[in-house]
């Protein structure tokens, strides 16, 4: 029997892509984070209202100067930990964070936080491998990203999708400004190697890029820079590199090692599929239940 949430305070969700016209919102990962959360809340039957909410869920990509004291404010820190300050944290009544490591720093600032990993909506795919090495992600302020620079000039087939890449990479590498989000799991599963990287502060503070969970959940294989706590969380199912030479060696090693890639990615897929939007929304609703009688009589 479905729960009736009609008497519960409606929730509104904000993300940093809400405030930017360029590039278009759909190329930002947090846009889809918000979209998929909204869809799951509605699917469960929980009211979502961006005009007159009782609860605000802020998906932290950058500070929001318009946080109202009239709503019950929840913060979910999923990126840019170096921007987090006590002044920001005190605007919220509940704080979630995707990094177990960074939670201690939040505690040191005088606030309580719970770990809630950013989920994936990807599902496993079985398909023929069509690509050697791919990367899906925007440039960093129209500058080439470190992992692509570290890639060098490999002899294998490389494809890159994302905003701002045209002119920065060889023409035959360029896949387009955008790859349809609903079909990303097919792309990841059809690629021998998916490259991933992190902002420096996220890498240092244990903020695992959700692209990693997306790739693993789809059945793909990832090579990434290292992140504090990632090996423990994902049971060493992401291959990490430490230098350009190391990256090129690993690509050469795994391109023709189908069994090796499959063993590693299958281990990661089992873990990644635990982090889904239904469980994330259920946790937030659990918290709302715990405070609703007191705050919303």
Image: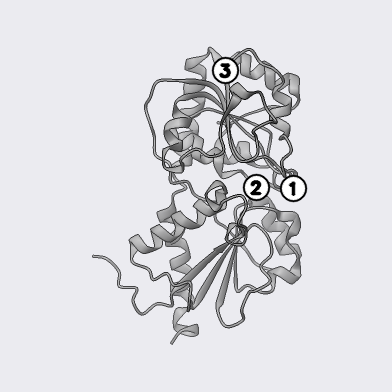
Q: CA distance from mark 1 to mark 3?
A: 31 Å
Element at label 1: helix
Residue 182 coordinates in the image, percent (x, y): 42, 42
In the rendered image, which residue does mark 1 sit on? 201
**Which of the pair 179/34 is nearer the observer?**
179
Residue 201 coordinates in the image, percent (x, y): 74, 47
First along the sequence among labels 2 and 1: 1
Disc marking residue 71: none
| Dots 2, 1 in contact, CB < 8 A | yes
Q: Residues within 10 Å of mark 1 (few under 14, many from 20)?
A: some
Element at label 2: loop
- Residue for point 37% across, 68% down: 46
Image side of residue 185 versus residue 19, left or right:
left
In the rendered image, which residue does mark 2 sit on? 207
Quadrant where the C terminus lies?
A: bottom left
Element at label 3: loop
- Residue for point 23% across, 65% down: 1
Residue 20 coordinates in the image, percent (x, y): 62, 58
Q: Is residue 112 above or below residue 26?
A: below
First along the sequence among labels 2 and 3: 3
In the rendered image, which residue does mark 3 sit on? 157
């Amino acid at each position: 029997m479905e729960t009736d949430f009609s008497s519960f305070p409606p929730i509104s969700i904000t993300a940093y892509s809400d405030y930017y016209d360029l590039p278009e919102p759909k190329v930002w990962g947090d846009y889809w984070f918000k979209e998929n959360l909204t869809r799951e809340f509605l699917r469960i039957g929980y009211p979502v209202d961006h005009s007159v909410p009782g609860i605000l869920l802020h998906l932290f990509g950058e500070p929001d100067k318009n946080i109202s004291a009239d709503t019950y404010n929840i913060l979910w820190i999923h990126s840019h930990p170096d921007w987090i300050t006590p002044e920001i944290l005190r605007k919220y009544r509940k704080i979630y964070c995707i990094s177990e490591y960074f939670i201690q720093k939040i505690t040191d600032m005088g606030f309580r936080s719970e770990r809630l990993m950013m989920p994936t909506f990807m599902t496993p795919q079985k398909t023929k491998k069509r690509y050697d090495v791919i990367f899906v992600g925007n440039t960093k302020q129209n500058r080439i990203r470190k992992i692509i620079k570290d890639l060098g000039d490999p002899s294998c087939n490389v494809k890159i999708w994302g905003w701002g890449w045209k002119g920065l990479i060889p023409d035959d590498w360029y896949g387009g400004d955008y790859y349809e989000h609903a079909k990303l799991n097919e792309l990841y599963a059809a690629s021998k190697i998916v490259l991933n990287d992190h902002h420096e502060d996220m890498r240092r503070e244990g903020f695992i890029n959700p692209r990693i969970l997306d790739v693993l959940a789809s059945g793909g294989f990832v090579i990434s820079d290292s992140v504090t706590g990632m090996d423990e969380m994902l049971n060493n199912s992401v291959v990490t590199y430490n230098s350009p030479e190391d990256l090129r060696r690993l690509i050469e090693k795994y391109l023709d090692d189908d069994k090796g890639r499959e063993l590693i990615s299958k281990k990661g897929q089992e873990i990644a599929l635990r982090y889904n939007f239904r469980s994330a929304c259920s946790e937030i609703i659990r918290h709302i239940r715990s405070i609703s009688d007191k705050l919303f009589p």
